[in-house]
Image (spheres, rainbow, N blue to C red):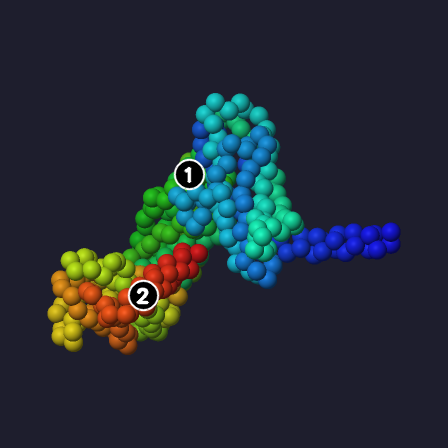
Amino acid sequence: MKKVMILIILIMMVQSVDALSFGISPGDMVFDNSLKGYTYENILTIINMDSEDMNYSLSSSGDIGEWVSFYYPDPNTQIQSVKVPANSKTSVIVKFQIPPDAASKKYTGELVVRSIPKKSDESGSQQSLIVGGSSEVIIIVTGDQIIDGVVNGISVNDIEPNYPLKIETMFRNTGNVVATPEIKVTILKDGEIIQSFIYDETTIKPSVTEAIIAEWKTTDENIPGDYTANVTVSLNEKILRSSDLTFTIFPVGTFTRQGNLTDIIIEGEPTVGSMVKVYAFFKNTGEIGTAAKFSGEVYKDGNLIDTITSEELQVEKYEEAELVSYFKLESKGDYLIKGKVIYSGKETPVEEVSLKVGKSIPGFEGIYLIAMMLLLVKFSDKKKSRKM
């Protein structure tokens, strides 16, 4: 009898420890003044503190059970489960679609997350221990349209002439309909107005917080010195916040320009007559935004046959961009692409990537196929990591 009791205690201890390896955030979601027929969004973060990757099922229950859908990694990819790497976390988008005929009252429910058991042996038996949790949801449906929001912060950065001043406003839509805030910006130097404009082109969904970027395009005529940006944020003719922000326009060349061509990847089936897409990944490691474009040379069997160039893109500081170009495989052979990124009058070191078009060497078809599969997996993983 004592042995049985000890065994039960040990099992309870194991369950307690495993339960600590999982978490979700937030623990509850409240949507006040939700409008009938509208869709509301929030983020649910799943935390896996286990030493192994885990798969989790996603479901909903209660009054709001049929209103809920989950999306990952983008708002258009609906899912019912998600994989969370070991000792990591993953955030999924949760959408709540309020029916047009919903009664005006309080609705409750839960978002339920549970681990999916793994097969533990060849016999097909599964792990019996399932960990998980739930996030309580309260949705108060009303028939009234509410337009409201809060400004969590406004910021600007120092710049150089010919670089846009980016006025970033963090806005949260606390209403129940889509909001279009109005950002009025007045630029002053030594107390005199240099320019004034209004930006009102960004729409934000209910319960969503988003950065709104308004730009003042500087020119060579904007001399270095100290400036002030008076920023007023309004919604539905109601002023939410007004701030005076100081910034400096420094002489050209004050901020460092630096960047790296981190990788070149080819997407597309390498067959005669096909068009392949070339991705060049450029990381701006400098202190200011820069225009960047990829320039490459295409060689076949050692001979230069073509040149390719991507569209020029503006890459903000510390960000990475995909520079895309194309070329057509006209015939069989060994192809080599050598390329570099040109930015702010500078060039990155030349990188290269190769591919073979046509019949492979006898006996090496399997190796070639595996190499192509690994290349596609590498490309897929790289794009996913940049989206996350």
Q: Mark 1 points at which residue?
A: 179
Q: Residue type at mark 2? A: Gly
Percent x, y of residue 126: 60, 50
Viewer-nearest residue: 249 or 176 = 176
Q: How many numbered marks, from 0 up?
A: 2
Front-lying residue, 307 or 259: 307
Q: Which mark is residue 168?
A: none
Q: Where is residue 187 in the image (x, y as percent from the top left)?
A: 35, 55
**Front label number (2 vs 1):** 2
The disc, 2 or 1, on the residue closer to the chain's N-terminal end is: 1
Q: Which secondary structure lies at badge 2?
A: helix
Q: Quadrant of residue 27 in the image?
A: top right
Labels 2 & 1 near each other (Cβ < 8 A):
no
Q: How crowded is mark 2: few (under 14 residues within 10 Å), some or many (20 or more)?
A: few
Location of residue 385 in the rendering, given as x and y in whole percent from the top left corner: 42, 60
Give the residue displayed 26% in from the left and 73% down from the top.
Answer: 352
Q: In this view, does 247 lie to the left or right of 348?
A: right
Q: Which of 110 and 57 is in front in this view?
A: 57
At x 54% / y 58%, what residue is drawn?
53
Q: Residues within 10 Å of mark 1 (few under 14, many from 20)?
A: many
Viewer can see residue 297? no
Q: Mark 2 points at which residue?
A: 366
Q: In the displayed structure, would residue 210 be above or below residue 290? A: above
Residue 247 pos. (x, y %):
40, 62
Above/below status of 288 relative to 82: below
SS for callout 1: loop
Quadrant holding the C terminus: bottom left
Residue 153 in sight: yes
Q: Which amino acid lies under the numbered mark 1 shown in the image of this protein?
A: Ala
Q: Residue drawn 49% across and 43% down?
A: 80
